[in-house]
């Protein structure tokens, strides 16, 4: 009798460890409890509808097969996630999503980030540049998470970990030092979105993917003549604290105004930030040091080659080609919401 009871208890424990499942129109959620599974599923559907309206202006059609979401919820887990999907013959499917973190961070940051990946994959049906994809997805997270990326951005720019725009726009895969990509991609995406909104940003990405000419897409959509001007103006905006931009009338775009007034020397290729030294008068009066500003040197470069990182050799031209899939082939693509480096390692799908 005791042996039988023990076996029953072991089966119950095994079933409980698998968690609860909840099905919506487009998602199948597995979570520790039925309540969490339902809450995550309904929230995912809401984000899928609302964010598609924000980015695209219309809701997405129902997926042929739902996206399974594996949720690992605990207070001690760092917030993170990974979403993978397959591009084949101009279609996308094979969804898989894994998310982890505290309940509140999953619901207000990880989930909207990962759902935005699926919206972009459904709309574009091909991989996006890493900075543009991760950057845009980070803009829909909770303000506390966006502030964290902003703080990391300043640290990276001050410690020689900034990514020159010619390298950033040419990246098709995650770099080994991935956190600067997230912070810088978020900041640049926010900078561009403020100059025309989310739908214009989507149009910009679509134009770049279609033509493979990202310099031309930047100029056509935002009126920056090249990546050097865009980089300078973005750095200046960051130096000022990344303030909300005042949009100009349609015939006097922000990019044109900024490009026309851009008379500064170009920043160093590695985007180092340095602190201005206080004058003796400031020091005597106990005034705080000036804000961090980008250092600038007189760099020479060819118009075709763009910047190159010190010690890295030449990189792809600033008119980099967009990632592409061979016709008739499948390509499993994965997008990851990176968690802070000091927190537990996130679950990443193989």
Image (cartoon, grey):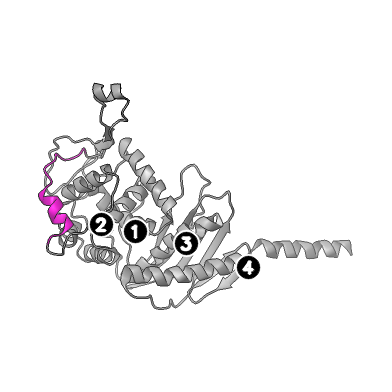
Residue 136, label in figure: 1
- Tell me: residue 29, above or below residue 72: below
Q: Earlier in the sequence, mark 3 or mark 2?
A: 3
Q: Looking at the image, is mark 3 or mark 1 earlier in the sequence? A: 3
Numbered disc 4: secondary structure: helix
Whether residue 22 is visible here, answered yes or no, is: yes
The foreground one among 42 and 29 is: 42
Q: CA distance from mark 4 to mark 3?
A: 18 Å
Quadrant of the image for the N terminus? bottom right
| Circle 1 crowding by C-alpha within 10 Å: few under 14, some 14–19, many from 20 | many
Q: Is residue 177 visible?
A: no
Q: Secondary structure at mark 1?
A: helix
Magenta region: 252-268
Q: Which mark is residue 157?
A: none
Kindly identify the residue that appears in the image at 84 percent across and 65 percent down.
4
Residue 262, x across and y down, in percent: 13, 46
The residue located at (39%, 64%) in the rendering is 116
Would residue 120 be found to the left or right of residue 258 on screen? right
Q: Is residue 254 magenta?
A: yes
Q: Is residue 240 above or below residue 336?
A: above
Q: CA distance from mark 3 to mark 1?
A: 14 Å
Q: Which mark is residue 111?
A: 3
Instruction: Tell me the residue that label 4 is attached to.
Output: 34
From mark 3 to mark 2, how far is it between C-alphas? 23 Å
Read off the residue under disc 2. Answer: 192
The residue closer to the viewer here, 4 or 292, is 292
Image spot of residue 165 (x, y percent): 24, 48
Disc 4/disc 1 C-alpha distance (Å):
31 Å
In the rendered image, residue 164 lying in the magenta stretch gets the answer: no
Asked if labels 2 and 3 touch by Cβ distance under 8 angstroms, the answer is no
């Amino acid at each position: 009798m005791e042996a039988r009871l023990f076996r029953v208890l072991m089966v119950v424990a095994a079933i409980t460890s698998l968690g609860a499942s909840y099905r919506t129109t487009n998602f199948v959620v597995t979570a520790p409890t039925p309540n969490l599974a339902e809450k995550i599923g309904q929230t995912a559907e809401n984000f899928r509808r609302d964010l598609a309206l924000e980015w695209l202006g219309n809701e997405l059609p129902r997926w042929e097969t739902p996206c399974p979401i594996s949720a690992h919820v605990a207070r001690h887990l760092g917030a993170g996630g990974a979403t993978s999907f397959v591009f084949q013959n101009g279609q996308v499917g094979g969804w898989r999503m894994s998310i982890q973190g505290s309940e509140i961070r999953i619901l207000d940051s990880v989930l909207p980030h990962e759902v935005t990946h699926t919206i972009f994959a459904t709309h574009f049906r091909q991989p996006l540049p890493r900075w543009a994809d991760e950057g845009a997805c980070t803009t829909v997270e909770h303000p506390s998470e966006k502030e964290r990326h902003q703080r990391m951005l300043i640290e990276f720019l001050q410690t020689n970990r900034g990514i020159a725009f010619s390298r950033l726009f040419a990246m098709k895969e995650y770099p080994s030092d991935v956190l600067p990509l997230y912070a810088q991609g978020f900041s640049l995406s926010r900078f561009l979105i403020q100059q025309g909104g989310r739908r214009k940003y989507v149009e910009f990405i679509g134009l770049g993917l279609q033509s493979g000419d990202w310099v031309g897409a930047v100029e056509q959509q935002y009126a920056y003549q090249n990546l050097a001007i865009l980089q300078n103006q973005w750095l200046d905006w960051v130096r000022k604290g990344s303030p909300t931009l005042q949009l100009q009338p349609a015939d006097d775009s922000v990019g044109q105004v900024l490009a026309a007034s851009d008379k500064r020397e170009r920043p160093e290729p590695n985007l180092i930030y340095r602190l201005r030294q206080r004058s003796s008068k400031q020091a005597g009066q106990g005034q705080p040091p000036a804000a961090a500003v980008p250092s600038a040197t007189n760099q020479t470069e060819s118009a075709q080659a763009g910047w190159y990182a010190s010690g890295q050799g030449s990189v792809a031209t600033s008119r980099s080609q967009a990632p592409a899939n061979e016709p008739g082939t499948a390509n499993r693509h994965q997008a990851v919401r990176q968690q802070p480096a000091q927190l537990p390692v996130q679950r990443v799908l193989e």
